[in-house]
Image (cartoon, rainbow, N blue to C red):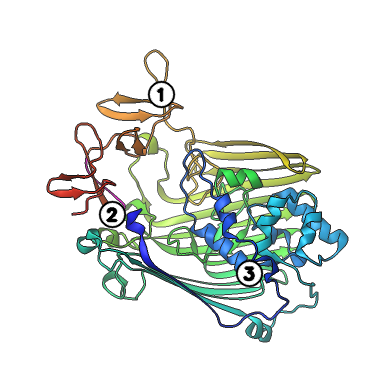
Amino acid sequence: MNESISILSIFLLVNMKLITSTCHAQNRSDYPWEEVMENLSISDEEGDIRNWENELEELTDLVNNPVNINSATKEQLQRFPFLNDVQIENLLAYIYIHGSMQTVYELQLVEELDRQTIQYLLPFVWVEPVDKKESVTLKQILKYGKHEAVTRMDVPLYKRKGYEKNYLGPAVYNSVKYGFHYREKVYAGIVAEKDSGEPFGALHNKQGYDYYSFYLLLHDIGILKTGIVGNYRLNFGQGLVLGQGSMFGKTAYSSSFTFRSTGIRRHTSTDEYNYFRGSGIALKWKQWTLSVFYSHRSLDGVIKGGEITSIYKTGLHRSEKEADKMNQLTMQMSGGNISYTGNSYQLGITGVYYCFNRSYEPELKDYSKYNLHGRSFYNLGMDYKYRFHRFSIQGEAALGISGMAFMNQVLYSPLQDIRLMLVHRYYSHDYWAMFAHSFSEGSSVQNENGWQYQNNDGSYATNTWQNIDGYWYVFDENSYMVTGWYWSGEEWYYLADNGQMQTGWFTQDGEEYYLDPDTGVMARNTTIDGHEMNSSGVKVS
């Protein structure tokens, strides 16, 4: 973690124009919302590592722009990862039956809302009488709109030798964000970022920052549910086809029992990969909602022989090798979703088609032989939700150019503080959805079982090293092949994506490591070929 230590982190928040309305800070100062993130981000037993930036951006947006409970819609309440479907329905029913709340402390009267959930919810909500005659005009937007500008700068405590030789820019990180919103109707924003080690206003970044993003979003104006131009994210159903929304892992998923179908959302973070760029629109008429979208954007990757051999997802362009991967390919995407919402149920269909400007042909062998390859692809999914008293069920079935995926869940809440949940999922080995993200063992919706090795006697290699055709592999306690960094209890090893133990010099994310040619053990606190290796095994000189 030493490489990420900084002596200066500047967060400048400028409120140029505030919405003049009833004070709602009563419940925000007493309950730190960061505690919510801490509790929801408990690591899963499987050690799943996720990028939390989008989730942090989501919660930050909610705490800065709390929801008026009295006018909250089901879609707005679904943005909160700690509310399950039963709690949302009971909250809406309470307001429908009893009328507007006079104070946030009326939440204690809502059935199924326990003390912990209320504690989580308080920083994100407020109470104000509903103005049924509210109109959206340019005059209203300009007068009551809120402007926010945030900048962050990280300056390292020390000089990193890697930056002196390998990286093209200074070790300073800087990002700038500007956002504007009027109530929950109009949003606009610009994001610019330069990672540590990337040049500013020079070389491949002559335009200044390395990454720029923008968006303009209209929400809930007449039949227009959402309209957006710029960078956006998509999430429908259970995420088996499109899942770019918040997903906090199994722990939080189990507590809220849902993957939020939030539809079209603006992309406000500095994540340089997980977004679309183009336009989208969602129209709502009675119980029907129709969403259509189109995207055309550049991606980082490696081109060999006129074909795409890999897609680079980090967004880092610090060295010449990383800069050479910048904007090497383009991808077009189009699709849509149609859903019908009844009193206690919802049905939806999602389809997406995407293509690259050249054929995507990664190396297909061993574990990866069923991976995506070609030039154009599609995914189609059907999802459902149904609630009956204390029972709630939901699920999705999805198809790709080959393979399929299923997710089904049942929740039963016999008492307020007791919830019983059953989850069934099946992701076939050849199902591939480039933009899927759902409840899973890893980061992808594909082949969760992994690879096993069967011995001659019919048993499977378990908790052991295994030499297969001259290569060493590791199999875990469940008899599945291990990939990535592996800690034996004494030493570090690296197993490639195909499971083979690596030896010699090895580069990952711009850092160089050395693995013993005979044993595969990572070198630490020593000198190899005249190069100093630190305690983390990284070459520093």
Residue 507 falls within the magenta-colored stretch: yes
Residue 514, x across and y down, in percent: 22, 43
**In the rendered structure, which amino acid carries the disc numbered 3?**
Asn
Q: Secondary structure at mark 3?
A: loop
Magenta residue span = 504-510
Residue nearest the observer in this picture, 186 or 520? 520
**Residue 424 sits in which quadrant?**
top right
Residue 421, x across and y down, in percent: 67, 37
Considering only order in the chain, which callout, 1 or 3, is on the residue closer to the N terminus?
3
Q: Which disc is residue 510 wearing?
A: 2
Q: CA distance from mark 3 to mark 2?
A: 38 Å
Residue that carries the numbered disc 3 in the rendered image: 65
Determine the residue located farthest toward the right in the rendered image.
97
> Quick one: label 3, few (<14), some, or many (20+) residues within 10 Å?
some
Considering the whole magenta stretch, tell me its main secondary structure.
Answer: strand
Q: Secondary structure at mark 2?
A: loop
Q: Which residue is found at the position 53% from the left and 60% from the top?
A: 56
Residue that carries the numbered disc 1 in the rendered image: 462
**Residue 205 sits in which quadrant?**
bottom left
Considering only order in the chain, which callout, 2 or 1, is on the residue closer to the N terminus?
1
Residue nearest the observer in this picture, 460 or 43? 43
Q: Work out whether 244 lies above or below 172.
A: above
**In the rendered structure, which amino acid carries the disc numbered 2?**
Gly
Q: CA distance from mark 1 to mark 2?
A: 33 Å
Q: Which residue is found at the position 43% from the left and 62% from the top?
A: 272
Whether residue 346 is visible, yes or no, is no
Q: Work out whether 235 lies above or below 295.
A: above
Numbered-mark total: 3
Q: Work out whether 190 lies above or below 97.
A: below
**In the rendered structure, which amino acid carries the disc numbered 1?**
Thr
